[in-house]
Image: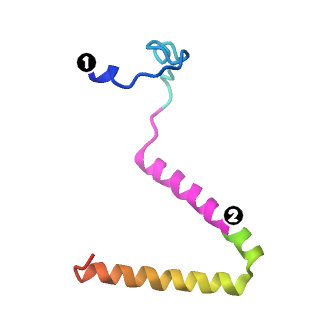
Amino acid sequence: MAEHLTWRSANPALKADTFARAPSVVDEEAMTLVGTVNKTALALLVLLVSATWEFAKFLGAREIFGCFIAFQVTKLVKFLGKVDGHP
């Protein structure tokens, strides 16, 4: 069986010609890898800021700072362990 026919859907809206009939945008440029990385970084930043905001309302600023320091120490220990050649 052909490779492109192995992933079929039972959804009647997804026929073989569904995407062939979709309008194409000729004048637009494709998104670059740098643009993708930047959008992903921005989305993660928004996620972390909003999560920290809610977490700080629950615990308080002192606990948030303690969690941040613990995370940095854990990250440093993990990084230095890999530098020595150990997993």
68 relative position to 7: left or right: right
- Residue 9: x, y in percent? 46, 22
- Density class for disc 1 (Cα within 10 Å; few <14, some 14-19, many ≥20) is few
Residue 21 — which label?
Answer: none
Q: Secondary structure at mark 1?
A: loop
Q: Amino acid at mark 2?
A: Ser
Viewed as shown, does residue 24 lie left or right of 49? left
The residue singled out by tag 1 in the image is 1
What residue is rendered at 52% in x and 58% in y? 41
Residue 47 in the image: state x and y as whole percent: 62, 60
From the image, which quarter does the N terminus lie in? top left
Dot 2 crowding, Cα within 10 Å, few <14, some 14–19, many 20+: few
Q: Residue at x 52, y 53 (%)?
A: 40
Q: Which residues are magenta?
A: 29-51
Callout 1, which amino acid?
A: Met
Which of the numbered marks, if any, corresponds to residue 50? 2
Q: How many marks?
A: 2
Task: Mark 1 vs mark 2: give the one in front.
Answer: 1
User: Is residue 56 rendered magenta in the image?
Assistant: no
Q: What residue lies at 27% left-to-right and 80% top-to-bottom?
A: 83
Q: Is residue 80 left or right of residue 36?
A: left
Q: Could you say where residue 11 lies in the image, as x and y percent from the top left? A: 53, 20
The answer for how far apart the CA atoms under marks 1 and 2 are is 48 Å
- At x 76%, y 75%, the residue is 58
Is residue 45 within the magenta segment?
A: yes
Mark 1 or mark 2, earlier in chain? 1
SS at circle 2: helix
Q: Is residue 52 left or right of residue 16?
A: right
